[in-house]
Amino acid sequence: MKKINLSSIFFRSIFVLVFFICQNIIAQMLPTSSLKSLGKESDSGIKGPSYAELVRYFSTLPQKYPEQVQLFNYGMTPKKRPLLALRIAYPQRFLVTRSSVGPAILITGATHGNEYLNIEDRLPEWFAAQAPKNHTLDSYFKTGGVIYIIPIFNPDGYDTRRRENSRGIDLNRDYTVKQANYVGFKEIETQLFRDFLQNILQKDNKRLSLTIDYHCCIGAALYPWSYRGAPELPANFLALFQDFGSVFKNIMGQQFRVGTTPKILGYSAIGTSKDYFYENYQALSFTYEGEVDEENQKFDLHTQMLTQFVAKIQSLRFRQINR
Ligand SMILES: [Zn+2]
């Protein structure tokens, strides 16, 4: 029979008790309604909460910020996960600006399900909370600007931590690029998104001005075109892409690279979202590639960067260059 060491059991029990008390205290110190920073797990994006948990969290935002946040469910994935978009806007101002077309900024994340950064899901609440306090954001929203955010574009891939959707298709190769004779929109996620975007822009009377599609982990901002043999961008657009690109570099550091996919990455890609947004909407469209380490620790840098973009879009709309 094994001898039981009573003092060791006693100390172990004390240890377990102290551990649970500390854990509870720490849990109470964390904000309950905001997402906390999460740990890094793999060589690509980090591991986030389950999609169901994120859906529950996003669902609380319209009640918490009734003046700033509206939540849209624009369909279901093949595995029956809801596709969600958040609109950050001052809806009561829409009527005032109906006569003129306002700018729209689109932010998407986790198109590649394993490239979640824990930035994209925190942005809706940050914009909603900051809008009334931050002069740049407040004037953008007051004059009819909107921000659409789809934090998790590929929920089936996100929950299973894979790049592709549940049918094994890379959604960032599933956009139509007319001038490359490439037909996309074969997948449910991209079809529903294309229609949702068209409809909401029309209904809200907005023009898609800037898009940022969050990916990981190269440390670069990529702009069109990404396919092989593409023409040079017209000079006015090239200047704008480079001007916005300098914001990425100023904030993320001079090691951060800005350019086209073939130039920066050395390979081409056809059917990417940025080529579609640029070709179809003449939007300034970027793929943002996070850096390998601790992108989620750079939330403040992202909000600084996005605030500068909002200011730039706001000044461009009055110069009418972006059309
Ligand atoms: Zn990616």
Image (tube, rainbow, N blue to C red):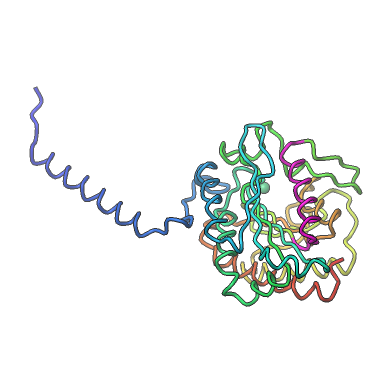
In the image, residue 118 lies in the stretch drawn in magenta: no
Q: Nearer the viewer, residue 112 or 267?
A: 112
Which residue corresponds to the image point at 55% horizontal and 42% vertical from the top-left?
51
Which residue corresponds to the image point at 52% horizontal and 46% vertical from the top-left?
56
- Give the extent of the magenta segment: 187-210
In the image, residue 202 lies in the stretch drawn in magenta: yes
Q: Toward which corner of the image does residue 169 lie, by quadrant?
A: top right
Residue 32's x, y, as percent?
A: 42, 56
Tell whether 276 sits left or right of 253: right
Q: Compared with residue 165, is residue 141 higher up or lower down, i.e. above or below? A: below
Tell whether 188 sits left or right of 123: right
Which residue corresponds to the image point at 76% horizontal and 71% vertical from the top-left?
243
Tell whether 211 sits left or right of 161: right
Q: Compared with residue 93, is residue 153 higher up or lower down, i.e. above or below? A: above
Residue 195's x, y, as percent?
A: 78, 45
Residue 304's x, y, as percent?
A: 60, 70
Q: Compared with residue 244, is residue 290 higher up or lower down, i.e. above or below? A: above
